[in-house]
Amino acid sequence: MAKIIVVTSGKGGVGKTTSSAALGTGIALKGHKTVIIDFDVGLRNLDLIMGCERRVVYDFVNVINKEATLNQALIKDKRTDGLYILPASQTRDKDALTLEGVDAVLKELAEEFDYIICDSPAGIERGAQMALYFADVAVVVTNPEVSSVRDSDRILGILQSKSRRAERGDAPIEEHLLITRYHPERVSAGEMLSVEDVEEILAIPLIGVIPESESVLKASNQGTPVILETESEAGLAYTDAVDRLMGEERPMRFLDVQRKGFFKRLLGG
Amino acid sequence: MGIFDYFKSKSQPSSASVAKDRLQIIVAHERSKRQQPDYLPQMQQEIIDVIRKYVQVDSKDVQIQLENIEDCSVLELNVTLPDQ
Ligand SMILES: Nc1ncnc2c1ncn2[C@@H]1O[C@H](COP(=O)(O)OP(=O)(O)O)[C@@H](O)[C@H]1O
Ligand SMILES: [Mg+2]
Protein backbone atom coordinates (compact mmCIF):
# COMPACT_ATOMS: atom_id res chain seq x y z
CA MET A 1 0.00 0.00 0.00
CA ALA A 2 1.29 3.42 -0.92
CA LYS A 3 1.55 5.97 1.83
CA ILE A 4 0.14 9.40 1.01
CA ILE A 5 1.95 12.27 2.75
CA VAL A 6 0.64 15.84 2.51
CA VAL A 7 3.01 18.74 3.11
CA THR A 8 0.77 21.53 4.32
CA SER A 9 0.79 24.75 6.37
CA GLY A 10 -2.07 27.15 5.80
CA LYS A 11 0.26 30.10 5.39
CA GLY A 12 2.16 30.64 2.13
CA GLY A 13 5.89 31.00 1.75
CA VAL A 14 6.80 28.95 4.82
CA GLY A 15 8.71 26.23 2.95
CA LYS A 16 6.17 23.62 1.79
CA THR A 17 7.59 23.22 -1.71
CA THR A 18 11.18 23.29 -0.44
CA SER A 19 10.22 20.61 2.09
CA SER A 20 8.23 18.48 -0.39
CA ALA A 21 11.22 18.40 -2.72
CA ALA A 22 13.64 17.58 0.11
CA LEU A 23 11.48 14.95 1.81
CA GLY A 24 10.49 13.27 -1.46
CA THR A 25 14.13 13.08 -2.56
CA GLY A 26 15.20 11.79 0.85
CA ILE A 27 12.56 9.06 0.86
CA ALA A 28 13.51 7.97 -2.66
CA LEU A 29 17.18 7.88 -1.63
CA LYS A 30 16.18 5.28 0.94
CA GLY A 31 15.06 3.03 -1.89
CA HIS A 32 11.32 3.72 -1.89
CA LYS A 33 9.64 4.50 -5.18
CA THR A 34 8.31 8.02 -4.68
CA VAL A 35 6.27 10.58 -6.57
CA ILE A 36 5.87 14.25 -5.60
CA ILE A 37 2.67 15.89 -6.82
CA ASP A 38 2.39 19.67 -7.15
CA PHE A 39 -1.15 20.60 -6.06
CA ASP A 40 -0.59 24.33 -6.50
CA VAL A 41 -2.81 24.82 -9.54
CA GLY A 42 -1.90 28.03 -11.38
CA LEU A 43 1.31 28.51 -9.41
CA ARG A 44 3.46 25.60 -10.53
CA ASN A 45 6.83 25.77 -8.74
CA LEU A 46 7.88 22.31 -7.70
CA ASP A 47 9.29 21.74 -11.20
CA LEU A 48 11.68 24.70 -10.73
CA ILE A 49 12.81 23.56 -7.29
CA MET A 50 13.42 20.06 -8.66
CA GLY A 51 15.14 21.43 -11.77
CA CYS A 52 12.84 19.74 -14.29
CA GLU A 53 10.88 22.77 -15.54
CA ARG A 54 11.99 22.31 -19.14
CA ARG A 55 10.78 18.74 -19.24
CA VAL A 56 7.15 19.49 -18.37
CA VAL A 57 4.87 18.43 -21.23
CA TYR A 58 1.67 17.32 -19.54
CA ASP A 59 0.43 18.04 -16.05
CA PHE A 60 -1.85 16.81 -13.25
CA VAL A 61 -4.97 18.40 -14.73
CA ASN A 62 -4.27 16.89 -18.17
CA VAL A 63 -4.22 13.48 -16.51
CA ILE A 64 -7.46 14.14 -14.61
CA ASN A 65 -9.13 15.30 -17.84
CA LYS A 66 -7.73 12.25 -19.67
CA GLU A 67 -5.85 14.45 -22.12
CA ALA A 68 -2.69 12.53 -21.21
CA THR A 69 -1.83 9.29 -19.48
CA LEU A 70 -0.07 9.25 -16.15
CA ASN A 71 3.06 7.86 -17.77
CA GLN A 72 3.13 10.75 -20.22
CA ALA A 73 2.84 13.33 -17.45
CA LEU A 74 5.22 11.85 -14.87
CA ILE A 75 8.75 13.27 -15.02
CA LYS A 76 11.53 10.96 -13.94
CA ASP A 77 14.04 12.74 -11.75
CA LYS A 78 17.52 12.80 -13.31
CA ARG A 79 19.46 12.72 -10.06
CA THR A 80 17.61 10.34 -7.80
CA ASP A 81 16.55 6.83 -8.76
CA GLY A 82 12.94 5.91 -8.20
CA LEU A 83 11.80 9.54 -7.93
CA TYR A 84 9.11 11.10 -10.13
CA ILE A 85 7.38 14.48 -10.30
CA LEU A 86 3.81 15.21 -11.36
CA PRO A 87 3.71 18.92 -12.20
CA ALA A 88 0.81 21.26 -11.47
CA SER A 89 -1.24 22.79 -14.19
CA GLN A 90 -0.83 26.46 -15.07
CA THR A 91 -4.54 26.84 -15.70
CA ARG A 92 -6.32 29.71 -13.98
CA ASP A 93 -9.32 27.49 -13.40
CA LYS A 94 -9.20 26.89 -9.66
CA ASP A 95 -11.81 24.16 -9.98
CA ALA A 96 -9.69 22.09 -12.37
CA LEU A 97 -9.03 19.58 -9.59
CA THR A 98 -11.98 17.49 -8.45
CA LEU A 99 -12.06 15.00 -5.59
CA GLU A 100 -13.07 12.20 -7.97
CA GLY A 101 -10.29 13.12 -10.41
CA VAL A 102 -7.64 13.33 -7.70
CA ASP A 103 -8.87 10.07 -6.20
CA ALA A 104 -8.54 8.26 -9.54
CA VAL A 105 -5.00 9.55 -10.13
CA LEU A 106 -3.89 8.67 -6.58
CA LYS A 107 -5.32 5.16 -6.96
CA GLU A 108 -3.39 4.63 -10.16
CA LEU A 109 -0.18 5.99 -8.59
CA ALA A 110 -0.66 3.80 -5.52
CA GLU A 111 -0.31 0.69 -7.68
CA GLU A 112 3.21 1.66 -8.63
CA PHE A 113 4.61 3.86 -5.87
CA ASP A 114 5.49 3.36 -2.20
CA TYR A 115 5.17 7.03 -1.26
CA ILE A 116 3.05 9.81 -2.72
CA ILE A 117 4.00 13.31 -1.51
CA CYS A 118 1.37 16.03 -2.00
CA ASP A 119 2.80 19.56 -2.06
CA SER A 120 -0.14 21.68 -0.90
CA PRO A 121 -0.97 25.19 -2.05
CA ALA A 122 -1.30 27.90 0.62
CA GLY A 123 -4.60 28.67 2.27
CA ILE A 124 -7.21 26.60 4.04
CA GLU A 125 -9.75 26.55 1.23
CA ARG A 126 -10.49 24.16 -1.60
CA GLY A 127 -6.98 23.74 -3.03
CA ALA A 128 -5.40 22.96 0.32
CA GLN A 129 -8.29 20.70 1.27
CA MET A 130 -7.92 18.79 -1.99
CA ALA A 131 -4.23 18.18 -1.26
CA LEU A 132 -4.86 16.84 2.23
CA TYR A 133 -8.13 14.97 1.70
CA PHE A 134 -6.67 11.53 0.91
CA ALA A 135 -3.60 11.77 3.16
CA ASP A 136 -2.40 9.13 5.60
CA VAL A 137 0.33 11.36 7.03
CA ALA A 138 0.60 15.16 7.30
CA VAL A 139 3.79 17.15 7.62
CA VAL A 140 2.75 20.54 8.97
CA VAL A 141 5.36 23.10 7.97
CA THR A 142 5.54 25.97 10.44
CA ASN A 143 7.77 29.03 10.80
CA PRO A 144 8.41 30.24 14.35
CA GLU A 145 6.22 33.29 13.88
CA VAL A 146 2.68 34.13 15.06
CA SER A 147 0.69 33.97 11.83
CA SER A 148 2.32 30.75 10.66
CA VAL A 149 1.67 29.00 13.99
CA ARG A 150 -1.95 30.10 14.03
CA ASP A 151 -2.49 28.94 10.45
CA SER A 152 -0.88 25.60 11.24
CA ASP A 153 -3.38 25.14 14.03
CA ARG A 154 -6.21 25.88 11.60
CA ILE A 155 -4.86 23.31 9.15
CA LEU A 156 -4.73 20.79 12.01
CA GLY A 157 -8.43 21.45 12.56
CA ILE A 158 -9.11 20.72 8.89
CA LEU A 159 -6.99 17.56 8.92
CA GLN A 160 -9.08 16.38 11.86
CA SER A 161 -12.48 17.20 10.38
CA LYS A 162 -12.41 17.53 6.60
CA SER A 163 -10.12 14.70 5.48
CA ARG A 164 -11.32 11.38 4.12
CA ARG A 165 -10.07 9.64 7.24
CA ALA A 166 -12.07 12.02 9.43
CA GLU A 167 -15.21 11.74 7.32
CA ARG A 168 -15.07 7.95 7.33
CA GLY A 169 -14.21 7.71 11.00
CA ASP A 170 -10.97 5.86 10.16
CA ALA A 171 -7.79 6.19 12.21
CA PRO A 172 -6.80 9.88 12.14
CA ILE A 173 -4.10 11.29 9.87
CA GLU A 174 -0.68 10.94 11.47
CA GLU A 175 0.48 14.52 12.16
CA HIS A 176 4.07 15.73 12.26
CA LEU A 177 5.45 19.18 12.94
CA LEU A 178 8.29 20.45 10.75
CA ILE A 179 9.66 23.80 11.89
CA THR A 180 11.52 25.64 9.14
CA ARG A 181 13.47 28.90 8.83
CA TYR A 182 14.65 28.63 12.42
CA HIS A 183 17.16 31.22 13.69
CA PRO A 184 18.84 29.99 16.90
CA GLU A 185 20.41 33.45 17.40
CA ARG A 186 17.08 35.23 17.32
CA VAL A 187 15.52 32.64 19.59
CA SER A 188 18.23 33.10 22.18
CA ALA A 189 17.78 36.88 21.95
CA GLY A 190 14.10 36.41 22.79
CA GLU A 191 13.01 37.71 19.38
CA MET A 192 11.67 34.47 17.97
CA LEU A 193 9.48 31.66 19.27
CA SER A 194 11.54 28.64 20.28
CA VAL A 195 11.05 25.04 19.17
CA GLU A 196 9.58 24.29 22.61
CA ASP A 197 7.13 27.21 22.33
CA VAL A 198 5.81 26.03 18.96
CA GLU A 199 5.62 22.41 20.12
CA GLU A 200 3.72 23.43 23.22
CA ILE A 201 1.16 25.46 21.29
CA LEU A 202 0.54 23.02 18.45
CA ALA A 203 0.94 19.88 20.58
CA ILE A 204 1.91 17.48 17.79
CA PRO A 205 5.13 15.46 17.54
CA LEU A 206 8.16 17.19 16.08
CA ILE A 207 9.73 15.58 13.00
CA GLY A 208 12.46 18.15 12.41
CA VAL A 209 13.77 21.68 12.66
CA ILE A 210 15.30 23.21 9.53
CA PRO A 211 17.51 26.23 10.21
CA GLU A 212 17.32 29.37 8.10
CA SER A 213 20.07 28.79 5.61
CA GLU A 214 21.51 30.45 2.54
CA SER A 215 21.94 27.05 0.98
CA VAL A 216 18.15 26.81 0.48
CA LEU A 217 18.21 29.81 -1.85
CA LYS A 218 21.34 28.57 -3.62
CA ALA A 219 19.86 25.12 -4.14
CA SER A 220 16.65 26.61 -5.50
CA ASN A 221 18.65 28.80 -7.88
CA GLN A 222 20.22 25.67 -9.28
CA GLY A 223 17.10 23.53 -9.24
CA THR A 224 18.52 21.01 -6.78
CA PRO A 225 16.58 19.83 -3.74
CA VAL A 226 18.53 21.14 -0.74
CA ILE A 227 18.69 17.68 0.86
CA LEU A 228 21.34 16.80 -1.74
CA GLU A 229 23.58 19.57 -0.35
CA THR A 230 25.29 17.39 2.19
CA GLU A 231 27.53 20.21 3.37
CA SER A 232 24.63 22.38 4.37
CA GLU A 233 22.89 22.38 7.74
CA ALA A 234 19.47 22.67 6.12
CA GLY A 235 20.24 19.65 3.93
CA LEU A 236 21.40 17.59 6.91
CA ALA A 237 18.40 18.67 8.97
CA TYR A 238 16.11 17.43 6.18
CA THR A 239 17.99 14.11 6.07
CA ASP A 240 17.37 13.72 9.80
CA ALA A 241 13.68 14.57 9.31
CA VAL A 242 13.36 11.86 6.64
CA ASP A 243 14.99 9.32 8.97
CA ARG A 244 12.54 10.23 11.72
CA LEU A 245 9.62 10.02 9.31
CA MET A 246 10.75 6.47 8.58
CA GLY A 247 10.68 5.72 12.29
CA GLU A 248 14.36 6.07 13.11
CA GLU A 249 15.57 8.07 16.08
CA ARG A 250 17.84 11.01 15.45
CA PRO A 251 18.94 13.66 17.93
CA MET A 252 17.96 17.23 16.97
CA ARG A 253 20.82 19.28 15.56
CA PHE A 254 21.47 22.93 14.73
CA LEU A 255 19.20 24.27 17.48
CA ASP A 256 21.87 26.14 19.41
CA VAL A 257 23.72 29.31 18.67
CA GLN A 258 27.03 28.49 17.14
CA ARG A 259 30.00 30.39 18.32
CA LYS A 260 32.00 31.12 15.27
CA GLY A 261 35.71 30.69 15.66
CA PHE A 262 37.99 33.58 14.82
CA PHE A 263 39.09 32.09 11.51
CA LYS A 264 35.62 31.08 10.47
CA ARG A 265 34.45 34.61 11.16
CA LEU A 266 37.39 35.98 9.25
CA LEU A 267 36.59 33.77 6.29
CA GLY A 268 32.90 34.58 6.51
CA GLY A 269 32.06 30.89 6.98
CA MET B 1 20.11 54.47 26.27
CA GLY B 2 20.39 55.59 29.89
CA ILE B 3 20.96 53.31 32.80
CA PHE B 4 17.29 53.45 33.85
CA ASP B 5 16.15 52.42 30.39
CA TYR B 6 18.48 49.49 30.66
CA PHE B 7 16.82 48.27 33.83
CA LYS B 8 13.38 48.94 32.43
CA SER B 9 14.02 46.96 29.28
CA LYS B 10 15.40 44.07 31.33
CA SER B 11 12.21 43.73 33.30
CA GLN B 12 10.01 43.64 30.22
CA PRO B 13 9.09 40.25 28.79
CA SER B 14 10.78 39.37 25.52
CA SER B 15 8.78 39.81 22.35
CA ALA B 16 8.88 36.03 21.83
CA SER B 17 7.17 35.40 25.15
CA VAL B 18 4.51 38.00 24.31
CA ALA B 19 3.99 36.17 21.01
CA LYS B 20 3.66 32.85 22.81
CA ASP B 21 1.08 34.18 25.27
CA ARG B 22 -1.00 35.74 22.52
CA LEU B 23 -0.86 32.57 20.45
CA GLN B 24 -1.90 30.36 23.34
CA ILE B 25 -4.99 32.48 23.91
CA ILE B 26 -6.11 32.77 20.30
CA VAL B 27 -5.40 29.12 19.50
CA ALA B 28 -7.36 27.92 22.55
CA HIS B 29 -10.25 30.18 21.56
CA GLU B 30 -10.27 29.00 17.94
CA ARG B 31 -10.03 25.35 18.98
CA SER B 32 -13.01 25.58 21.29
CA LYS B 33 -14.99 27.23 18.49
CA ARG B 34 -14.03 24.45 16.10
CA GLN B 35 -15.11 21.82 18.55
CA GLN B 36 -18.53 23.30 19.14
CA PRO B 37 -21.39 21.39 17.53
CA ASP B 38 -22.77 22.71 14.25
CA TYR B 39 -26.21 23.32 15.76
CA LEU B 40 -24.89 25.75 18.40
CA PRO B 41 -25.28 29.07 16.52
CA GLN B 42 -28.85 28.23 15.53
CA MET B 43 -29.76 27.02 19.01
CA GLN B 44 -28.22 30.17 20.43
CA GLN B 45 -30.44 32.31 18.20
CA GLU B 46 -33.56 30.37 19.12
CA ILE B 47 -32.84 30.65 22.84
CA ILE B 48 -32.45 34.41 22.43
CA ASP B 49 -35.75 34.56 20.57
CA VAL B 50 -37.55 32.69 23.37
CA ILE B 51 -36.13 35.00 26.03
CA ARG B 52 -37.16 38.01 23.98
CA LYS B 53 -40.78 36.82 24.01
CA TYR B 54 -40.81 37.64 27.71
CA VAL B 55 -38.12 40.23 28.38
CA GLN B 56 -36.71 42.90 26.15
CA VAL B 57 -33.01 42.09 25.99
CA ASP B 58 -30.31 42.88 23.51
CA SER B 59 -28.51 39.95 21.89
CA LYS B 60 -25.31 41.09 23.57
CA ASP B 61 -27.01 40.67 26.95
CA VAL B 62 -27.37 36.96 26.33
CA GLN B 63 -24.23 34.90 26.50
CA ILE B 64 -24.26 31.23 25.66
CA GLN B 65 -21.22 29.07 26.06
CA LEU B 66 -20.59 25.41 25.68
CA GLU B 67 -17.78 24.21 27.86
CA ASN B 68 -16.23 20.80 27.96
CA ILE B 69 -15.09 19.81 31.41
CA GLU B 70 -13.54 16.35 31.27
CA ASP B 71 -16.19 14.13 29.71
CA CYS B 72 -19.09 16.37 30.52
CA SER B 73 -20.40 19.25 28.40
CA VAL B 74 -21.92 22.23 30.16
CA LEU B 75 -24.15 24.70 28.39
CA GLU B 76 -23.87 27.97 30.25
CA LEU B 77 -26.50 30.62 29.73
CA ASN B 78 -26.01 34.13 31.08
CA VAL B 79 -28.77 36.67 30.65
CA THR B 80 -28.42 40.22 31.88
CA LEU B 81 -31.94 41.41 32.59
CA PRO B 82 -32.68 45.10 32.14
CA ASP B 83 -33.31 47.30 35.21
CA GLN B 84 -36.98 47.43 36.15
N1 LIG C 1 15.26 26.88 5.70
C1 LIG C 1 15.20 27.92 4.87
N2 LIG C 1 16.17 28.87 4.87
C2 LIG C 1 16.11 29.93 4.05
N3 LIG C 1 15.13 30.14 3.15
C3 LIG C 1 14.14 29.25 3.08
C4 LIG C 1 14.10 28.09 3.93
N4 LIG C 1 12.99 27.37 3.62
C5 LIG C 1 12.35 28.03 2.64
N5 LIG C 1 13.03 29.16 2.30
C6 LIG C 1 12.67 30.15 1.26
O1 LIG C 1 11.36 30.59 1.52
C7 LIG C 1 10.67 30.85 0.31
C8 LIG C 1 9.36 30.10 0.27
O2 LIG C 1 9.62 28.71 0.23
P1 LIG C 1 8.63 27.69 -0.47
O3 LIG C 1 9.16 26.32 -0.24
O4 LIG C 1 8.36 28.08 -1.88
O5 LIG C 1 7.33 27.93 0.41
P2 LIG C 1 5.80 27.51 0.16
O6 LIG C 1 5.80 26.34 -0.78
O7 LIG C 1 5.30 27.16 1.54
O8 LIG C 1 5.11 28.71 -0.38
C9 LIG C 1 11.61 30.48 -0.81
O9 LIG C 1 12.23 31.65 -1.28
C10 LIG C 1 12.62 29.57 -0.14
O10 LIG C 1 13.87 29.63 -0.76
MG1 LIG D 1 4.70 26.02 -2.64
Image (spheres, coloured by chain):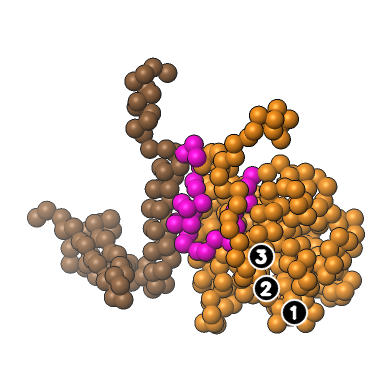
Chain colours: A orange, B brown
Q: Distance of mark 2 from mark 3, alpha carbons?
A: 17 Å
Tell me the residue that label 1 is attached to.
A110
Tell me the kind of residue under disc 3.
Asp
Specify the subunit that label 2 lies on: A
- At a point 58% along the width and 58% down the height, the residue shown is A251
Q: Nearer the viewer, residue B80 or A101?
A: A101
**Which badge, 2 or 3, is on the more N-terminal residue?**
2
**Within 10 Å of the Cα at label 2, are there few (<14), some (14-19), or many (20+) other Cα atoms?**
many
**Which badge, 1 or 2, is on the more N-terminal residue?**
2
Tell me the kind of residue under disc 1.
Ala
The mark closer to the camera, 1 or 3, is 3
> Are the two marked residues, 1 and 2, in contact with CB atoms closer than 8 angstroms?
yes
The mark closer to the camera, 2 or 3, is 3
Q: Is residue A82 above or below residue A52?
A: below
**Within 10 Å of the Cα at label 3, are there few (<14), some (14-19), or many (20+) other Cα atoms?**
some
Query: Is B14 on the left or on the right of A125, as rendered?
Result: left
Query: Is A74 on the left or on the right of A152, as rendered?
Result: right
Tell me the residue that label 3 is attached to.
A243
User: Does the segment drawn in magenta span residue A199?
Assistant: yes
- At a point 31% along the width and 76% down the height, the residue shown is B71
Helix, strand or loop under label 1: helix
Q: Nearer the viewer, residue A48 or A190?
A: A190
**Which badge, 1 or 3, is on the more N-terminal residue?**
1
- At a point 86% along the width and 57% down the height, the residue shown is A52
Q: Nearer the viewer, residue A3 or A157?
A: A3
Q: Is residue A87 above or below residue A268?
A: below
Considering the image in quadrants, where does the C terminus of chain A appear? top right
Which residue in the rendered view is the most extreme toward the left? B84
From which residue to which does the magenta span run? A188-212
- At a point 74% along the width and 76% down the height, the residue shown is A114
Q: Distance of mark 1 from mark 2, alpha carbons?
A: 9 Å
